[in-house]
Amino acid sequence: MSTPAELEEGVTTPLTGIRRTAARHMVKAWAAPVFHLTVEVDMGEAARVKEVAPKATVTDVLVRASARALVAVPEVNVHVGEDAVVAFQRANVGIAVATEKGLTVPVIHGADALSIEQIAARRGEIVQRAREGALTRDDITGGTFTISNLGMMGIARFDAILNVPQAAILAVGATTERFVQGEGGPVWRPIADVTLTCDHRALDGAAGARFLAVLAAELSAPLAS
């Protein structure tokens, strides 16, 4: 039987590998002056994705919508340095993936130029390699924006921590049926809260709001268009 002294000592587990790297990034991210913007998004069209692309998921729709929003609002598609902001023409969207060794963010490069089917294929490849611990350096570098989706775990709404040096990250909550005002009156619709964390050194509220407006429009638009 353990003595009180032994119970108080606990077990020390050094941070190594991905967890150690993530911890260092979190310290840098926490130092950034951030703000958060949240909107409610109708996910009805996104939920139909398998009717259009059987191997695709809602995450793939989120990647496409985010990529298109990054092109429409390029102020968000940047890296933030100590004395400069670096802008990118292509939208390289990272997806936060939980693995046994810790959180990692594989990247779908050039997502703005890919179809839903192409995004789904790329996402399937890199997520599988992430969980197998087989990601290459190219898989995890070059990201310009990140999506963290905890909706499938029942999390209603949350604020994600920046994936530095990126200027923004999108947190996606669970989709729930809500009674909202429609064109013909109140109606039940599948709605999710999405929250954009922004680095205030590169972005202001107006840019963040424009990004979310485009994102919401892309998510609610017919998938076949």
Image (cartoon, grey):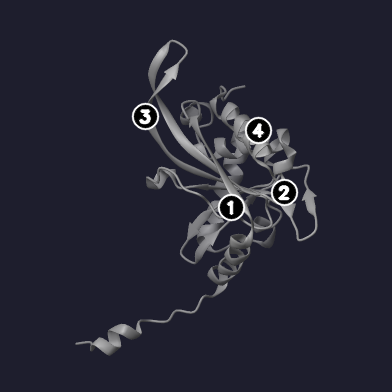
| Circle 2 SS class | loop
Which residue shows up at 61% across the image and 65% down it?
25
Q: Position of residue 21 (x, y in %)?
A: 59, 69
* Other-residue count near label 2 (Cα within 10 Å), few / some / many at <14 / 14–19 / ≥20: many
Whole-number angstrom distance, CA of label 1 to CA of label 3? 31 Å
Which callout, 2 or 1, points to the residue nearer the camera? 2
Q: Position of residue 142 (x, y in %)?
A: 71, 54
Seen at 53% across and 51% down, the residue is 160
Residue at mark 3: 177
Say which residue label 2 marks: 202
Residue 37 against residue 189 in the figure, above or below = below
Q: Secondary structure at mark 4?
A: helix
| Res 210 label | 4
Could you tell me residue 153's position as x and y percent?
39, 47
Residue 56, percent across and down? 52, 37
The kind of residue on which mark 4 rests is Arg
